[in-house]
């Protein structure tokens, strides 16, 4: 799947999941959303192994960002550790679940 189609798929998944969030979480998620962009994230805390994800939130006023894993077709949380590593913390079932887990 090319990058434009992948970005459109991600936006459609987010749009669908926004409908199931309560008003407060939906409002927060909408304020954090950005155009999906690729970024290399570590898949371990040490930063010795990384992979490309799609970042979908900006992380402003929040220590976490939501990322989409194209290979696993799932969302999850990323945070920047004290050692500077941008760590993908694991997979959630949906964008809505990732928002709820923040």
Image: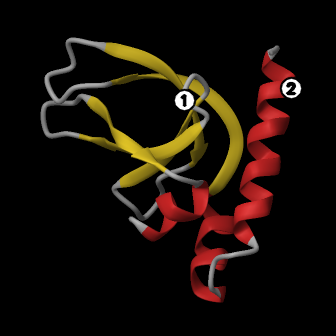
* Residue 61: assigned label: none
* Rendered view: 22 above or below 61: below
Q: Quadrant of residue 36?
A: top right
Tag 2–tag 1 contact (CB < 8 Å): no
Q: Quadrant of residue 43?
A: top left
Mark 2 residue crowding within 10 angstroms, few (<14) / some (14–19) / many (20+): few
Q: Between residues 16 and 86, which one lies in front from this camera angle? A: 16
Considering the image in quadrants, where does the C terminus appear?
bottom left
**Relative to 91, 9 lies left or right:** right
Task: Tell me residue 84's x, y (percent).
Answer: 21, 30
Q: Between residues 83 and 73, which one lies in front from this camera angle? A: 73
Task: Tell me residue 83's x, y (percent).
Answer: 13, 31
Task: Tell me residue 25's x, y (percent).
Answer: 57, 78
Q: Residue at x 85, y 23 (%)?
A: 4
- Can see residue 9? yes
Residue picked out by circle 2: 5
Q: Residue at x 30, y 33 (%)?
A: 87
**Relative to 99, 70 lies left or right:** right
User: Which comes before the other along the chain, label 2 or label 1?
Assistant: 2
Mark 1 residue crowding within 10 angstroms, few (<14) / some (14–19) / many (20+): few
- Can see residue 77? no
Secondary structure at numbered mark 2: helix
**Relative to 56, 99 lies left or right:** left
* Rendered view: 68 above or below 77: above
* Rendered view: 55 above or below 77: above
**Relative to 5, 76 lies left or right:** left
* Rendered view: 47 above or below 18: above
* Residue 72: assigned label: 1
Task: Tell me residue 88's x, y (percent).
Answer: 35, 35
Eye-nearest disc, 2 or 1: 1
Q: CA distance from mark 2 to mark 1?
A: 16 Å
């Amino acid at each position: 799947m090319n990058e434009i189609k992948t970005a459109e798929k991600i936006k459609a998944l987010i749009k669908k999941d926004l409908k199931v969030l309560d008003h407060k979480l939906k409002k927060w998620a909408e304020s954090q959303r950005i155009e999906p962009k690729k970024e290399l994230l570590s898949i371990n805390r040490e930063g010795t192994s990384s992979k490309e994800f799609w970042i979908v939130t900006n992380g402003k006023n929040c220590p976490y960002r939501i990322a989409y894993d194209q290979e696993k077709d799932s969302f999850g949380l990323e945070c920047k550790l004290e050692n500077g590593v941008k760590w993908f913390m694991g997979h959630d079932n949906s964008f809505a679940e990732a928002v709820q887990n923040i």
